[in-house]
């Protein structure tokens, strides 16, 4: 579709932002908005004269669409949890829409802060490097508010975002060059810098329309850590009507996003499947040992509690920080799932194993790929030594 | 030896504009060009001057390194122009056809050797150079099916030339075992590189030769009669071609007469117009070369593709449903309708099947290599494409060798380049890496 007046408007102001123009130093910023509004008219020069319609903007927008079910459900659940803990809170107007509106009002400032701080830094770096602004943060910036407790103070969120974007990404050269998932870097930052705001029983349920006060309420993982079975039923956990980080609770909503990611081919099915396989196998192994509540926990509970499903679908599959070879992806995913369950069960003082497990495997991913590729190199070398001495050998010497 | 190989990985791009099986005879065309830059590894020394009369098969240029290797004139005629580019590099020798003086050809069976006018049709891997007659290849590969988008049907092209083809195979057998390959599966099943990888991958220090099936017939004709007649059936098509069909012509023909007929908008710059809205590609749309409307067919090409230039913006293209956009990923609605179409449900529901539009737009900005897993699905080699590409980008020669650089040519990466969401110039990167290695190997 072409819209003439938009094209004309951009054509008109483009010289101002081009090199030598009055605002030439803002070129990256202009370019970001320009390419956002109008897919560039760049044409191929050599090689393949036609190109696939997909680009990184399209890939990122698919991730964002895949996040929407979890996001919308998470908003509703924020209100629902407050209602559960304090039935008088909504007076007599305890409707579906009211719950959702409450959650929306709680989430919106977090999303706005995340985007403003994160994109601000991204634009500044792109400007300084004369690069195009990378759209990767559009997904990261939405992910961060989705994986923290609803009562996280905004200033802490802002700090975490700044840390994640600068230390997690830009120091390595920006999106595509980072080796840690930036959204998880933000969460890990909060987890270690402000542990009291990130764990325990008094962070998950908002007590008012604003502010950081919470109503006490344990997550299934919190209950397990203290040696009790979760009070929520399996159905509750599937649907997601349980306390937890804002948008991680609903297995079904996450599964909807997963379907889109898998259908479009944006996320690796190998990673997604193998994370669940790894987690399930580890769970079964612990079941075989048995003895405590956590060891005896049916393996599929691990998929339903905490951030396991969310991490498997949206975090582990980040192509930049995951293993890049197909074999490597299997190993990477299996170990993420296994380590996440291991951390949960073997160290109950540590509430969420998924985050640490993925970050750890992010670090290991290049090593995994190295080993996988080394095998290919070795097989090629052995092929040479098998055929050396045959007629072809003299070809280049002669 | 005949091989049937099946390839699963790959992609057939539904480009549209397939050549109809109508053959236009253009063997009487007047202008031809011999283009030394098309022949990799050939350092030309000019043997003729403007105005000289030449006979078909007479050498026009020879290789400075090995004077046995020559590029001959395709027809009897006169040297109309010698085209030089930057640094006086010889770009082309243009020949104008003239009636031959009778009896010019010694009609006698001739053996295939380095001095033969048909020798340049034999290419060598690694590097895709003209075959070095001193090398001993471990095999000679001839593909019997070209799977490039809109490529000619080789069985159709060889009809009537079977006798010559057999003779060509017999002549080539004197140098090494000839592997004729009938591939099944999506593109790049028909690429020689894919077939070599499946049958006998190239190791460091080895080499294989390859010949286009139509050129095998030309070689055969030469050995049988001693006449150099580089005939080729060329598929002319593409979404921007007016009447896609086959043309029977001689190698290096001027495409001006084809362009006049096929261009939707005849106001093309080199034809006296101003607006350049169509790109003419000599060769496949995936790895061919853009040529002007008054240019010439590439030395090794057997297809001509017409495609719209895509030099216009699109409003929020990244957000639009994209019913007409083609993507290997299924990130556009066309991915869904395309899938439903296969089940036949689309017809029943009355929704029309997706028709894709293709142009030369890049469809996005260049990015770092952020995405993984796509290349492997269109790259049927025992090679890690992303890792090899990165080794080429950083110029790590040792790693390139370890990862199998000698087994590939730029065209083998064409589909990787097509599907890449980061819009990396992959074929250019591979070509430059190979050039460095080739110069080291021949230095």
Image: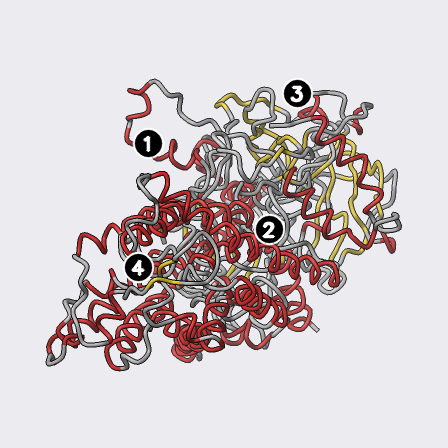
What residue is pinned by disc 4?
A243
For mark 4, does the 10 Å Cα neighbourhood hold few (<14), some (14 to 19), or many (20 or more) residues? many
Q: Which mark is residue B264?
A: 3
Q: Which mark is residue B423?
A: 2
Residues at badges 3 and 2 in contact (C-beta under 8 Å)? no
Q: Which mark is residue B362?
A: none
C-alpha distance separating marks 1 and 3:
33 Å
* Letter of the chain that mark 2 sits on in the rendering: B
* Letter of the chain that mark 4 sits on in the rendering: A
C-alpha distance separating marks 3 and 2:
29 Å
Q: Residue at x 51, y 66 (%)?
A: A182
| Disc 1 versus disc 4: nearer the observer | 4
C-alpha distance separating marks 1 and 4:
40 Å
Side of A181 relative to B70 (left or right):
left
In the image, residue A244 sits, relative to residue A37, either above or below, namely: below
Q: Mark 2 or mark 1, which is nearer the start of the sequence?
A: 1
Q: Name the secondary structure under disc 2.
A: loop
Q: Colour mode?
A: secondary structure
* Letter of the chain that mark 1 sits on in the rendering: B
Residues at badges 4 and 2 in contact (C-beta under 8 Å)? no
Q: Mark 3 or mark 1, which is nearer the start of the sequence?
A: 3
For mark 2, does the 10 Å Cα neighbourhood hold few (<14), some (14 to 19), or many (20 or more) residues? many
**Are labels 1 and 2 on one chain?**
yes
What residue is pinned by disc 1?
B340
* Letter of the chain that mark 3 sits on in the rendering: B
């Amino acid at each position: 579709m072409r819209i003439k007046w938009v094209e004309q408007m951009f054509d008109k102001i483009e010289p101002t932002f081009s090199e030598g123009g009055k605002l030439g130093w803002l070129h990256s910023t202009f370019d970001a908005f320009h390419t956002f509004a109008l897919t560039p008219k760049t044409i191929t020069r050599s090689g393949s004269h036609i190109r696939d319609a997909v680009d990184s903007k399209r890939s990122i927008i698919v991730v964002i669409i895949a996040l929407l079910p979890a996001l919308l459900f998470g908003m509703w659940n924020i209100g629902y949890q407050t209602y559960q803990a304090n039935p008088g809170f909504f007076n007599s107007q305890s409707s579906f829409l009211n719950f959702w509106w409450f959650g929306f009002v709680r989430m919106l400032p977090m999303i706005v802060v995340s985007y403003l701080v994160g994109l601000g830094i991204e634009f500044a770096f792109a400007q300084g490097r004369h690069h195009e602004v990378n759209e990767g943060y559009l997904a990261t910036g939405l992910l961060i508010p989705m994986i923290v407790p609803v009562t996280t103070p905004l200033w802490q969120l802002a700090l975490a975002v700044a840390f994640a974007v600068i230390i997690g990404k830009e120091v390595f050269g920006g999106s595509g060059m980072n080796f840690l998932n930036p959204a998880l870097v933000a969460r890990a930052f909060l987890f270690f810098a402000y542990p009291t705001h990130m764990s325990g029983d008094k962070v998950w349920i908002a007590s008012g329309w604003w502010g950081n006060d919470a109503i006490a309420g344990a997550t299934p993982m919190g209950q397990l850590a203290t040696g009790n079975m979760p009070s929520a039923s399996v159905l509750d956990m599937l649907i997601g009507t349980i306390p937890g980080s804002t948008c991680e609770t609903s297995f079904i909503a996450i599964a909807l996003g997963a379907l889109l990611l898998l259908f479009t081919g944006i996320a690796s099915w190998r990673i997604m499947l193998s994370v669940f396989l790894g987690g399930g196998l580890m769970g079964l192994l612990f079941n075989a040992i048995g003895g405590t509540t956590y060891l005896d926990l049916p393996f599929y509970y691990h998929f339903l509690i905490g951030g396991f499903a969310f991490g498997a679908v949206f975090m582990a599959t980040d192509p930049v920080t995951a293993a890049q070879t197909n074999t490597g992806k299997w190993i990477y995913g299996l170990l993420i799932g296994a380590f996440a369950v291991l951390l949960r069960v073997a160290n109950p003082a540590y509430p969420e194993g998924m985050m640490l497990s993925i970050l750890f495997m992010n670090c290991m991913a290049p090593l995994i790929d190295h080993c996988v590729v080394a095998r290919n190199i070795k097989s090629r070398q052995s092929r040479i030594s098998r055929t050396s001495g045959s007629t072809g050998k003299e070809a280049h010497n002669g | 030896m005949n091989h049937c190989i099946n390839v699963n990985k790959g992609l057939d791009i539904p480009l549209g504009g397939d050549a109809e099986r109508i053959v236009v005879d253009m063997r009487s065309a007047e202008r031809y060009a011999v283009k030394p830059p098309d022949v990799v590894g050939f350092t030309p020394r000019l043997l003729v001057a403007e105005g000289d009369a030449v006979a078909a098969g007479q050498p026009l240029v020879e290789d400075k390194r090995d004077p046995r290797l020559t590029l001959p004139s395709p027809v009897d005629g006169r040297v109309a122009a010698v085209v030089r580019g930057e640094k006086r590099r010889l770009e082309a020798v243009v020949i104008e056809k003239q009636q031959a003086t009778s009896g010019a050809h010694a009609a006698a069976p001739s053996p295939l050797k380095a001095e033969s006018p048909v020798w340049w049709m034999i290419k060598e891997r690694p590097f895709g150079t003209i075959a070095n007659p001193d090398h001993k290849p471990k095999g000679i590969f001839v593909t019997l099916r070209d799977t490039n988008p809109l490529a000619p049907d080789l069985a159709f092209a060889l009809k009537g030339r079977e006798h010559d083809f057999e003779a060509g195979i017999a002549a080539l057998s004197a140098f090494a075992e000839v592997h004729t390959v009938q591939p099944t599966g999506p593109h790049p099943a028909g690429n020689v590189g894919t077939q070599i990888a499946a049958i006998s991958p190239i190791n460091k220090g080895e080499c294989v030769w390859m010949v286009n099936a139509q050129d095998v017939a030309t070689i055969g004709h030469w050995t049988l009669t001693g006449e150099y007649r580089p005939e080729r059936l060329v598929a002319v098509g593409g979404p921007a071609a007016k009447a896609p069909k086959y043309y029977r012509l001689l190698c290096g023909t001027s495409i001006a007469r084809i362009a006049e007929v096929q261009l939707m908008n005849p106001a093309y710059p080199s034809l006296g117009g101003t607006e350049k809205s169509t790109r003419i590609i000599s060769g496949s749309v995936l790895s061919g070369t853009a040529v002007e409307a008054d240019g010439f067919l590439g030395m090794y090409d057997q297809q001509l593709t017409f495609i719209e230039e895509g030099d216009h913006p699109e409003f929020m293209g990244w957000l639009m449903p994209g019913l007409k956009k083609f993507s290997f990923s299924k990130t556009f609605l066309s991915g869904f309708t395309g899938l439903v179409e296969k089940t036949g449900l689309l017809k029943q529901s009355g929704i029309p099947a997706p028709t894709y539009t293709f142009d030369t737009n890049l469809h996005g900005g260049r990015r770092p290599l952020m995405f993984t897993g796509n290349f492997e699905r269109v790259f049927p080699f025992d090679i890690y494409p992303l890792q090899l590409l990165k080794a080429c980008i950083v110029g790590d020669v040792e790693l390139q060798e370890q990862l199998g650089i000698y087994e590939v040519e730029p065209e083998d990466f064409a589909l990787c380049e097509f599907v890449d969401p980061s819009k990396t110039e992959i074929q250019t990167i591979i070509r430059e890496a190979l050039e460095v290695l080739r110069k080291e190997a021949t230095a």
